[in-house]
Image (cartoon, coloured by chain):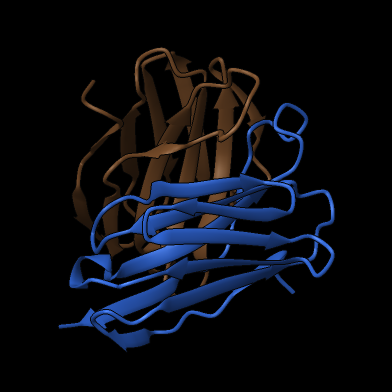
Amino acid sequence: QKEVEQDPGPLSVPEGAIVSLNCTYSNSAFQYFMWYRQYSRKGPELLMYTYSSGNKEDGRFTAQVDKSSKYISLFIRDSQPSDSATYLCAMSGNLEAAGNKLTFGGGTRVLVKP
Amino acid sequence: DAGVIQSPRHEVTEMGQEVTLRCKPISGHDYLFWYRQTMMRGLELLIYFNNNVPIDDSGMPEDRFSAKMPNASFSTLKIQPSEPRDSAVYFCASTLFDGGPPNEQFFGPGTRLTVL
């Protein structure tokens, strides 16, 4: 079983809908949680990060972490065709001890239809 | 800054040939990571360096794979001999550890490797 599980999708939604993405993990040492966005034939780019449990909002994006359930989510409100991409969750424990190493989920492909 | 630079962008080779992938990290970054991405296995960490020193190579699949970082501005990933199952997109990423989050890794555009 992988340390970080993520549904590969694809997830197809109409423009303007809310996109809901999530990851589950097994390592209780993880405390930094990130979402990367990867457009087709490009490298991943950091979208958002959160530390420990709680919510974080940035424009149309909201990241949630529930450490008790080992479950993280990303919501995209008012989705746009430009949001069509693969979204990867990534996690890390203590940054210095982990050597800045991230563990990635497999990614969920999202398609927002006009 | 130009970002992380990788070359070549595409590589097509025949089974048994040696393949060398190249990476130039962002200037001033002290960590460099090599990843491999496939549909089946997602994004896998192969090896990473801190200040040019390999720290963790547990993700390197076999002895056919080797990586070097002779200086702070250059790294190579070599596959010898290559096999069809090595076909994937190989990413290089770099980051600067400043003691705090978000520990953002900056990825290059990747090298798409096809081994026939």
Q: Is residue A78 above or below residue B106?
A: below
Front residue of this view, candidates A105 and B77: A105
Tell me which corner region of the image, top left, top right, bottom left or bottom right, holds residue A65: bottom right
Residue B58 horizontal/vertical position (percent): 68, 45
Q: Quadrant of the N terminus of chain B?
A: top left
The residue shown at (15%, 83%) is: A114
A20 to the left or right of B113: right
The residue shown at (31%, 33%) is: B22
Label the brown chain with its letter: B
Residue A8 horizontal/vertical position (percent): 48, 79
A69 to the left or right of A17: right
Tell me which corner region of the image, top left, top right, bottom left or bottom right, holds residue B19: top left
Q: Quadrant of the C terminus of chain B?
A: bottom left
Residue A98 horizontal/vertical position (percent): 73, 35
Q: Is residue A2 above or below residue B25?
A: below
Residue A43 can be seen, yes or no: yes
The residue shown at (62%, 70%) is: A23
The residue shown at (24%, 64%) is: A40
Tell me which corner region of the image, top left, top right, bottom left or bottom right, holds residue A81: bottom left
Residue B64 can be seen, yes or no: no
Q: Is residue B101 above or below residue A76?
A: above
Front residue of this view, candidates A69 and B76: A69
Residue B70 horizontal/vertical position (percent): 45, 15
Front residue of this view, candidates A85 and B113: A85
Label the blue chain with its letter: A
Front residue of this view, candidates B57 and B78: B57
A68 to the left or right of B9: right
